[in-house]
Image (cartoon, helix red, strand yellow):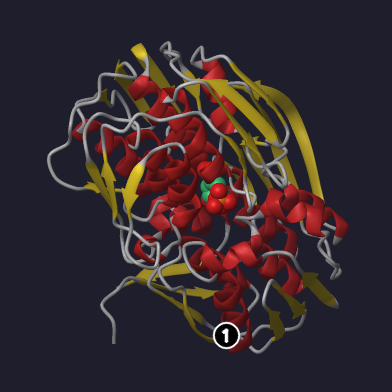
């Protein structure tokens, strides 16, 4: 028996209420990084108090940046300027965060000092050549393990050259790493993507006063620019909201309102997919929150039908497949996912983890190299391995709401990386979820 925390999920009631979902993880990471590099004092409002984003803030504190936390979810950041970071003592621990490690690789490659980035068991298995490759083309020196995984030993003091880089895979993390190195490089740096990805780095650099040209799928900046402190308001995280969007869609009688959710179009592919399946999701109170579109999402139960997820929507819902698989399980008929091989290199192999877990609960799931076909049907009981992946844990917490029995979900501690308080919020809305260890 493991002593790891686990959950028991079983049928609760129809979901009701108005929910405030914690701040966006991608935006919070970037807000801390750019505020640390800016000249002057920045305020961040709505900061995600998750382990991943706190790890990023700790890393900057280790490099001499001062943070104040006047109240939870707020940070006052005393920026040190692009040339003001100090050599850290010891390793820099990114925890579970691929975003933290990959963006920092670009930034630290350009510093005059050396540094070492480490992470937890999951992050230590993740591919880093996708960032070290283009950074090496710019003149950076970064050592990985022989198989391209962390730790990353970054040799500082290398002059960097701007590049024109065509990304082989659509990745906002790789794009951002190259752009951050490009800030310190000689000349222009251009990144071209095979499919547009989330553009928070581009938008936020502009908010910090950097001149950057960007359009969907392409970004270009000139090296040698400084950042000017600004205030950032972080919207509610769409990916965390996704678990409640799916849960309310599939639990009969549910109706929830999720307040001020970030609706950056590069994040909301799940809405397209669920609407194709027949979901009842309306958007109200459209507004702009720190330069990002937000709206309240009102989600009501609706019977779903299986569908084929269009391949070009996949990058816009890349973090939402664990939740989508549960919607597919509850839908009538088959749901087909293709073109999603990236899911194999996330916090876990999400195609395998979801397929295995749903099969444990009695469903038929045919897995392929880059996707799966999920055959909707009744869910039974069983024990699920989350592989320490926050989103796998939360997805099966939803599955448990439709189970005829109990679903045990192992190793749920990492839910705190992205969604601290998920179980409390979920139970308040109607879930049957108990935390044990
Ligand atoms: C992120 C980019 C995506 C996403 C991750 C956050 C970001 O990763 O899956 O959760 O903040 O840039 P990739 O760049 O690997 O697609």
Q: Assign a secondary structure to mark 1.
A: loop
Height in image: 49 above or below 325?
A: above
Picture coordinates of residue 175, whole percent (x, y): 56, 40
User: Which residue of the protein is positioned furthest toward the left in this rendering?
Assistant: 89
* Res 414 quadrant in image: bottom left
* Camera-nearest residue between 346 and 106: 106
Q: Quadrant of the N terminus?
A: bottom left
Whether residue 73 is visible, yes or no, is: yes
Height in image: 397 above or below 285?
A: below
Q: Tell me: 323 left or right of 228.
A: right
Height in image: 386 above or below 298?
A: below
* Res 138 quadrant in image: top left
Task: Look at 41% across and 24% down and name the residue there.
Answer: 184
Q: Tell me: 301 left or right of 428.
A: right
Picture coordinates of residue 166, whole percent (x, y): 64, 43
Query: Disc 1 marks which residue?
Result: 405
Picture coordinates of residue 143, whole percent (x, y): 31, 53
Crowding at dot 1, Cα within 10 Å, few <14 / some 14-19 / many 20+, comes out as some
Q: Quadrant of the C terminus?
A: bottom left
Q: How many marks?
A: 1
* Camera-nearest residue between 93 and 358: 93
* Camera-nearest residue between 82 and 252: 82
Task: Look at 83% across and 59% down and name the residue there.
Answer: 310
């Amino acid at each position: 028996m493991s002593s790891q925390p686990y959950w028991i999920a079983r049928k609760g009631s129809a979901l009701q209420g108005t929910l405030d979902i914690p701040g966006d993880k991608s935006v919070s990471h970037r807000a801390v990084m750019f505020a640390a590099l800016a000249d002057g004092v920045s305020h961040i409002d709505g900061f995600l108090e998750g382990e991943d984003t706190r790890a990023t803030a700790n890393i900057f504190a280790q490099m001499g940046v001062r943070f104040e936390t006047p109240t939870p979810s707020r940070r006052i950041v005393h920026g040190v300027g692009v040339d003001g970071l100090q050599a850290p003592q010891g390793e820099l621990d990114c925890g579970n965060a691929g975003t933290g490690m990959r963006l920092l690789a670009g930034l630290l490659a350009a510093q005059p000092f050396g540094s070492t980035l480490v992470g937890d068991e999951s992050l230590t298995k993740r591919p880093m050549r996708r960032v070290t490759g283009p950074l090496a083309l710019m003149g950076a020196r970064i050592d990985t393990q022989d198989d391209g995984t962390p730790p990353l030993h970054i040799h500082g003091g290398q002059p960097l050259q701007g590049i024109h880089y065509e990304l082989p895979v659509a990745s906002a993390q790789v794009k951002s790493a190259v752009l951050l190195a490009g800030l310190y490089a000689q000349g222009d740096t251009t990144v071209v993507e095979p499919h547009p990805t989330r553009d928070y780095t581009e938008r936020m650099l502009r908010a910090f006063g950097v001149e950057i040209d960007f359009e969907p799928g392409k970004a270009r900046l000139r090296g040698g620019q400084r950042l000017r402190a600004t205030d950032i308001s972080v919207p509610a995280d769409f990916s965390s909201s996704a678990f409640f969007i799916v849960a309310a869609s599939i639990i009969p009688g549910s109706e929830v309102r999720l307040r001020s959710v970030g609706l950056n179009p590069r994040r909301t592919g799940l809405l397209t997919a669920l609407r194709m399946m027949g979901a009842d999701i309306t958007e109200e109170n459209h507004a702009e929150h720190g330069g990002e579109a937000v709206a309240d999402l009102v989600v009501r139960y609706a019977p779903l039908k299986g569908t084929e997820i269009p391949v070009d929507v996949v990058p816009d819902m890349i973090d939402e497949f664990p939740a989508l698989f549960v919607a597919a399980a509850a839908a009538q008929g088959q749901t087909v996912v293709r073109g999603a091989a990236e899911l194999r290199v996330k916090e876990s192999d999400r195609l395998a983890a979801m397929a295995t877990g749903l099969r444990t609960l009695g469903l038929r799931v045919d897995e392929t190299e880059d996707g799966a076909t999920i055959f909707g049907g009744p869910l039974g009981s069983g024990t699920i391995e989350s592989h320490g992946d926050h989103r796998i844990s939360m997805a099966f917490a939803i599955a448990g709401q439709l189970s005829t029995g109990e679903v045990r979900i192992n190793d749920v501690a990492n839910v705190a990386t992205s969604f601290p308080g998920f179980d409390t919020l979920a139970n308040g809305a109607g879930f049957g979820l108990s935390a044990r260890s």
